[in-house]
Image (cartoon, grey):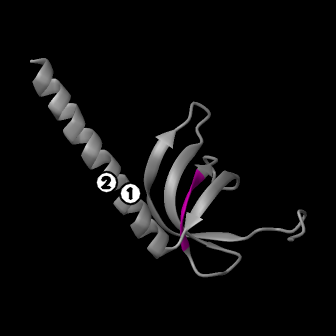
Amino acid sequence: MADSNSEVSFNIVEHFGVIATENSGWTKELNLVSWNEREAKYDIRSWAPDKKKMGRGVTLTGTECDSLKSLLNTRFSRTSSTIQENTQTAQ
């Protein structure tokens, strides 16, 4: 187990975008981040406006990101067609 007092270093290699902005100014973002000088991974988490503090998040490899994309495409494709069917039935 890592020492809870140890410093964590990070480098945002690529910023893909903001998912949401909180009233406090913190933003939930998708980035490619290298943690402790390791290989960069896709990262979803909240960041303070100055990027010096961050919340807990999730990191994904490229393969895991592809799997998530497939799951989301399946989920939202089905939801969109269900919404269209329900709208057409109601008319």
In the picture, measured across the screen, residue 21 lies left or right of residue 7, that is left
User: 89 above or below 68?
Assistant: above
Where on the picture, by quarter, is residue 58? bottom right
Q: Amino acid at mark 2?
A: Thr
From the viewer's side, name the closer residue of 50 and 79: 79
User: 62 above or below 76?
Assistant: below
- Judge the density around disc 2: few (<14), some (14-19), many (≥20) Cα neighbours within 10 Å: few
Look at mark 2 in the image and give the residue it sits on. Answer: 74
Distance Cα–Cα, label 2 vs label 1: 5 Å
**Magenta residues, dominant SS class:** strand
List x then y, in percent, for residue 22. 56, 35
In the picture, measured across the screen, residue 85 lies left or right of residue 25, that is left
- Judge the density around disc 1: few (<14), some (14-19), many (≥20) Cα neighbours within 10 Å: few
Q: Which residues are magenta?
A: 41-45
From the viewer's side, name the closer residue of 39 and 61: 61
Q: Is residue 46 magenta?
A: no
User: 57 above or below 85?
Assistant: below
User: 78 above or below 33?
Assistant: above
Q: Are marks 2 and 1 in contact (CB under 8 Å)?
A: yes
